[in-house]
Image (cartoon, rainbow, N blue to C red):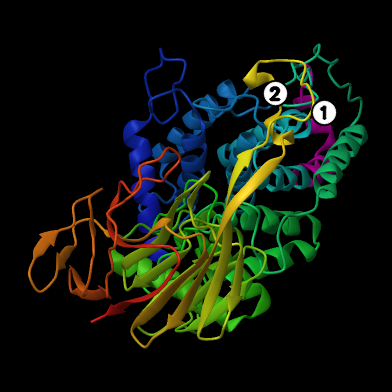
Amino acid sequence: MKRYWQHMVNSTEKRVEVFLKKQVNDPARADRGRMDSDVVEGKASIYVLTDALCLYFSEESKYYKDAALFAAVERGVSFVERWQRPDGSLDFPTCNFYSAPDTAFCFRRLYGAWEILKKYGTTEAEKALEERYLRIVLRCAPIIICGGFHTPNHRWAVLAALLTLEKLVAENGALAMETVDFSGCTFPHAVSADALPGEPEPAPVVASAQELLERIRIRAGQYLAEGIDGDADGEYAERSTGNYNSVVDKSLITAYEMSGDETYLGYVERNLDMMLYYFDGDDTIFTQNSTRQDQGKALHPDQYFYLYTYMAAHTGSDLFDAAAHKIIKDNLERGDDAPDCIYIFMLYDRLKNYTFRGYGFLPEYRRYFPGSQVLRVKKPSYVYSVLNKKSQFLFVKFGSLPVCVRIGEAYCDVRYFVPERTEDTGDGCVLRGTARGWYYEPWAQDQGTTDWWAMDHKKRERVITSQVDTTVTVKELERGIAVTVKTEGLSGLPLRVEVIVPAGSTLETDSVSLSANRGDSLILRNGYLHLHAGAQKLSIGPGYGTHSFKGHYSGEEKNEVGYSIYLNDYTPYERTFTIVEE
């Protein structure tokens, strides 16, 4: 780490300098001390205040022991003290209020700042600030105990905070009882999302530190009773490789640090192992299977840097070591800011002093993940991914050039072929799916109403008039893939294979050259289409186009960011085309 430490410090200085320039210093403003933004909120300030303290205690920083910086931190902490609600809530005011998860995310940085002050602070002012941070952290207890959550990853952020509070209250019982305030925790409960909440409940009465500890332990047990959602492959429920997987990993590492239970690290180790197979050939993360906002984004894995370093130091894994080194080295060479995790390295000397042994991601791989039903294959010149039960089921990437394949199937209530079964063949895969044409039967019994919308149509019997069975076979080639589409059953259904390529590419045949404009399309009726994007060249074909239908029904997914190349035919048929690098 020594060769990258100054990069970490310099990047942190850039973040802190933004804070110093934007800090509200008008004594007449109620939000004095925070970093100015569109709305009054504290999260951004809480995060950067921890960074500022790291610089203040870093001899390598120009802000080392800088009195002006320390004063700015004190003003920032004063704002947080005023802004925090009596029940400890640290709101996310553009969305969530009285939120245990949003408080838990801030709590992690607040606790980190307290640990930095505890480890490095020596002066009276530094120790006084340390106690102020401890009081803010302890004040979070009521909302962390009484609040709820929205998403899967929220649970483990709250759990991490609960386990941390358990440790803090055990060590600082008297201060905790002086600090925490449960009087605002009267949240009414609703038995379902549609039900109206009942009357406010009486605020919990906590008479002693031991009783507070018991409440913390009971609440932590309730979260753990749901079971951590990491599967045997290392995937979490949200499948958010570009964001929330790493958020869960951080929470579970904290849970381990507070409890000493190695079980938590087992989930982290499996997830980081899985992630090694989600790095594309251009070193970005494959995110197309995510259920969250990172879906489809090409992101570098910077947020995994400290996770791989932590687990490499803990397990001795050469793969984790090489991945961590590649992430930080490449980050520096790209000219990007270092990952925002300096406080973690300053807390753990074993991480700050860690020496990397290797460098790089897996050069090639092939792995099928049964839980998420994803096949990931990396070859020397391309990477491809197959996603079961998704309409966009095939992704191929040549360097940084992505290509996606889906099949339009406007058939009764079906809009796209969605594979139901995937078989890994060792040199490709086979995907199968069935669609049926159906119609409602008249009710056999009186429904007690003539109002169509009041009837429960899920209970109607249906008549099945036709069926289409689709088989897609992917075959690996040296410089790309061959795709065979075979349909059986219903005749006359105008199917359309849609190959989606980046907008801005140049497309050429022997007789025409055009620019691929965003949202536009063409039908490749025969021959091969040559695609040029920067220095990369692909060949797609042979084409076929026995009809001109490109789809138009409601419920169809419109390609508004790329360019669509259609290969069209009527069922039943069997056709093969290739996507290869020239």
Question: In the image, is residue 180 part of the stretch drawn in magenta?
Answer: yes
Percent of width and height locating residue 88: 68, 27
Front residue of 61/375: it is 375
Circle number at residue 455: 2
Q: Secondary structure at mark 1?
A: helix
Alpha-carbon neighbours of circle 1 within 10 Å: few (<14), some, or many (≥20)?
some
Q: Residue at x 37, y 78 (%)?
A: 382
Q: Is residue 432 left or right of residue 139?
A: left
| Location of mark 1 (residue) | 177
**Quarter occupied by the C terminus:** bottom left
Q: Position of residue 341 (x, y in %)?
A: 50, 55
Q: Is residue 354 visible?
A: no
Give the residues drawn in magenta, as a range.
Answer: 164-183
Q: Secondary structure at mark 2?
A: loop
The one of 396 and 349 positioned closer to us in this rendering: 396
Relative vertical location of residue 79 with respect to residue 290 in this rendering, above or below: above
Residue beneath the point at 38% across and 79% down: 481
Q: Residues within 10 Å of mark 2 (few under 14, many from 20)?
A: few
Q: Position of residue 350 (x, y in %)?
A: 61, 70
The one nearer the camera, 562 or 206, is: 562
Q: Residue at x 41, y 46 (%)?
A: 557
- Amino acid type at image mark 1: Met
Q: Find out whether the residues at labels 2 and 1 contact each other: C-beta distance under 8 Å.
A: no
Depth order, front residue of 116/211: 211
Q: Quadrant of residue 268?
A: bottom right
